[in-house]
Image (spheres, rainbow, N blue to C red):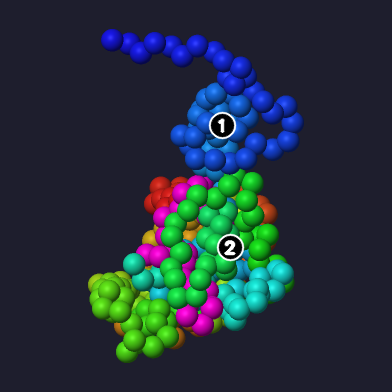
Amino acid sequence: MAKKRRPQTKSSTPQTTSGEVPVVGAREPCPCGSGRRYKACHGRAASHAVTELVRRPFEGLPGECDWVALRELVPAATAPLTLRDGLPEGVPSVTLATVLPMAWPALRRDDGSVLLGLQNDTASGDISRDLADTLQRALGAAPGTPVAAGRPASDGPRLQDLLDPDAPFTPEVHSGFEFWVENAESASAEVTASLERANEAAIPTRRLPGLTGAYWCDAGEKNHLRWVMDHPEEQLLDALARLHAAEESTLGQGTRLVGSFRAHGLVVPVWDLPTGMDAEAVAGPAQEFGERFTKALAATGALSAAERRARGGLINRQVTLS
């Protein structure tokens, strides 16, 4: 039998005519007084604003290319973060980490310092807003406690609002996740087991010095160079096509530009490297390629037939991660 429709009452009409409607639980009555649940009233617009995908969440942050690399490519890395308004009392430092034990979004250590995890699942379509929300909650958490996942307000701050725009972003790539613990001997059995599993699964990765967003990795059967670039996509693909058609897109004997993928609004060209070509060996050829690439970016003429074919091949091999 169908439920009887609840008759309208005075409380079913909005009770607020101006001002901001507070955020409440999705199933709670909307504070505006409409009589409907928040998720079906003012929460609907808020939910849409929070879930709308931000194509380049790290745009405007120093080192955007490295932010994308640490989010998608690098297993174990850290980077110190500088807050726009300085560190709160009792917080000696804030550090970004690719991954934290048990996939914690953040951790307030015993000494009051904060570790912010980058590679966690997020609740909204704006990773920057999610991370800013987690960071704010971590700054106020009790020392020695992890920070649980949450859902940011649609008008909450983003990392671009909290971090110093003039501070450099300098990642440090680690061979393992020992940075998780201040004292390995005092770590819990759960954290120790998580550390061992993470170290076993980590792909050896190195950041190439002097090249923003360029990372070498040992994938087993072959090595790769994955280079996050922030140039406009159409211009970038034209430049790669010009070099590929001229047989100048390689990084030396046995190397090959195999394609690219998109990640958080940026294009990431990928090269296959011989297994014997380590990070030190590819650094020089990558620098030389960077110089050729800069010249190709400056070219303004129409692509030749061979260059158009090369461009089509690059596009056909392109995928999107996020």
The percent position of residue 166, horizontal first and vertical second, equals: 72, 71
Q: Quadrant of residue 184?
A: bottom left
Q: Examine the image and state in which quarter residue 76 appears.
A: bottom left
**Quadrant of res 258:** bottom left
Residue 303 part of the magenta-drawn span = no
Up/down of 320 relative to 44, above or below = below
Region of the chain picked out in magenta, as a range: 103-128
Q: Amino acid at mark 2?
A: Gln
In the picture, measured across the screen, residue 280 lies left or right of residue 44, that is: left
Label number found at residue 136:
2
Circle nearer the N terminus (1, 2) = 1
Residue 182 visible to an observer of this rendering: yes
Tell me if I can see residue 257 in this picture: no
Element type where label 2 sits in the image: helix
Viewer-nearest residue: 278 or 247: 278
Task: Give the residue number, with chain letter if any, for mark 1.
Answer: 30
CA distance separating discs 1 and 2: 26 Å
276 to the left or right of 262 = left
Q: Nearer the viewer, residue 253 or 163?
A: 163
